[in-house]
Amino acid sequence: MDPITVIRSRTVVMPSTNIDTDQIIPARFLTTTVREGLGVSLFADWRYDQAGQPKPDFVLNQPAARGCQVLVAGRNIGCGSSREHAPWALLDFGIRVVISTEIADIFRNNSLKNGLLPVVVDEATHEWLLANPGVEVEVDLPASTLRLTDGREVTFPIESFSRYCLMNGIDELGYLLQQMDAIERYERTREGA
Amino acid sequence: MTAQSLFEKVWQRHVVVPETDDTPAILYIDLHLTHEVTSPQAFDVLRARKLPVRRLDRTLATMDHSTPTDTAQIFGGLPIKLESAARQVRQLEVNCAEFGVNLIGLQDSRRGIVHIIGPEQGATQPGKTIVCGDSHTSTHGAFGALAFGIGTTEVGYVLATQCLLQRKPKTLEIVVNGRLPAGVSAKDVVLAVIGKIGVNGGTGHVIEFRGSAIAAMSMDERMTVCNMSIEAGARAGMIAPDATTYEYLKGRPFAPQGTDWDKAVADWNTLSSDAGAAFDKSAAFDASTLEPMITFGTNPGMVTTISGNVPERPGDAVFAKSLAYMGLTAGERMAEKPVQVVFIGSCTNARLSDLEAAATILRGRKVARGVRALIVPGSQQIKLEAEQRGLAKVFTDAGAEWRESGCSMCLGMNGDLVDAGQYCVSTSNRNFEGRQGIGARTLLASPASAAAAAVRGRVTDPREFLG
Ligand code: SF4
């Protein structure tokens, strides 16, 4: 996992509410046994026509989307299935930050575990971002702050432990393994072994 | 001591290390269910870090999502047609063999949808923490377990440590009092709840369903309700265990036996929420006013009564886009809408009582011309029982297809698909765009409503078949 500190990027905007993980990556791509290579299937049913050709009017197919690392989405993105393939596909495509007013629980959790930063903002900031697609933003993880071109600085909530892991590019498994004594003690007490 | 809710009691029992401002709690997991789709990358992590599966006795694997429902591909020696699915099934076999995980394999008579066989085998029990790399793990909460879906990275954590890092969620109490009218099912209850609180109404919360209507439900019905908690965005859904729970569990293979059983029941009896337990949020429903429900849009919150109309929301572009996908217009009546496919199955509604509800309507009748009806039992045990009780014959006599168990048409990854533009009345849980196949239009409803639609070839109020 690549450490995250400050990400500066233009935004790509998908204003739909309740974008579920079946849209982010449809089920037929879940028969993979690896994490890599899912970027081409990201939003497949919205992105390609029946012949498999990119639809020119879909936002991610437009030249302006190229290189964008920040996705601004409508309320409640990531609802539905727990498939971690959703953040894998977004990351493989090049997205590193997802901004919305609400982000569904399991998707947010999965994103944090993979170095995809979920940023929840207030309605006013969100509306401004929706109204200004392609604007350059700065996402400052150490300061938990989103900086907009109009000079606004908006702090966003993030669990301090997750922030620590993201900033250092480490996963939580190492931390859990260090707690093995406590885990074993717990098991002994409960199982009476 | 302060009054505690069911959730708080189960949570507290499983805290290995309490949460602090800086670190989440370490939560112990009693039962880890795993399947072929969300586990391969987790086993790879164990391999890369040279870690074993820490508690094989708490880990149970099966295959259900990408497995075909065609008998020839399961038992007839034919290979699994979808090559990538075959590879995924094979990979789970390899991983379970290598790590020693107990696998309910492709031809095992106990196989089925993971959320159906956990309870069926008695592995799902009150007071347990249960996880699976699958959002509908919420189903198991019907037994008073704290059960929730996790991603693949966390599947790896649980395999390696039997623990997860968790912040304590909030609680939402949903009280359903009163008696359900005839022809109104548990599926209608949960669809009505989601319609009211919305697909994000439960975000960050664990729901406890309570009230006289919930207490009167069978375990099958309670599982239907808890199954769809995730469709309201909730982390989990729970129902306090009671005599109905114990009667269901007693004697099942993984359930405690003999004196252990009595001890377990005594303990489980202490789990119910104390009088006066506080919840962060609360909502109430009157069961006696509920009606059969059906969805009209592309998320489960877009739902109306089966006798109702598609609502009108002028100026809402997202709503309009959803209706355009569905080929429906605002204000249109749902009843009488022609349908091409009926799917009775999934972890929401493929248990024996669901099949019985469908058979009551299909018995002696025919599936309408031009309609494809696919009936897929939730497990091989249910399949066997449905065959012994003559239900399977009712279905095949009516002209429906009767299959081997699995997720089937609930999601388009195993070969069972709805074609683009077709309407499918489905007893599953998600009507997302493309969920049942590219361009498929899903109408979520109860097994009775699905069977009624199969007979008439149109969206039909199942109460027309009552009496
Ligand atoms: S039946 Fe559907 S919802 Fe249930 S586990 Fe299978 S795919 Fe998921």
Image: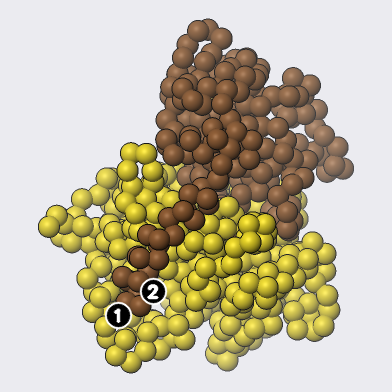
Chain colours: A brown, B yellow
The residues tagged by marks 1 and 2 sit, at their Cα atoms, a distance apart of: 10 Å
Crowd band around label 2 with a 10 angstrom C-alpha radius: few (<14), some (14–19), many (20+):
many
Quarter of image, res B198: top left
Identify the subunit bearing mark 2.
Answer: B
User: Can you say whether A80 is above or below B117 in the image?
Assistant: above
Along the horizontal axis of the image, is A44 left or right of A16? right
Q: Position of residue B251 (x, y in %)?
A: 40, 89
Task: Report the amino acid beneath label 2.
Answer: Gln
Q: Is residue B437 visible?
A: no
Front-most of residues B415 and A96? A96
Q: Is residue B60 visible?
A: yes
Q: Residue at position x 27%, y 86% from top?
A: B262
Determine contact: label 1, label 2, CB under 8 Å.
Answer: yes
Please tell me if label 1 and label 2 are on a single chain: yes
User: Can you say whether B1 is above or below B324 in the image?
Assistant: below
Crowd band around label 1 with a 10 angstrom C-alpha radius: few (<14), some (14–19), many (20+):
some
Identify the subunit bearing mark 1.
Answer: B
Front-most of residues A131 and B33? B33
Chain-order first, disc 1 or disc 2: 2
Q: Residue at position x 57%, y 22% from top?
A: A6
Q: Position of residue A11 (x, y in %)?
A: 63, 21
Task: Report the amino acid beneath label 1.
Answer: Ala
Residue that mark 1 sits on: B264
Residue that mark 2 sits on: B125
Q: Label 1, secondary structure: give it.
A: helix
Quarter of image, res B372: bottom right
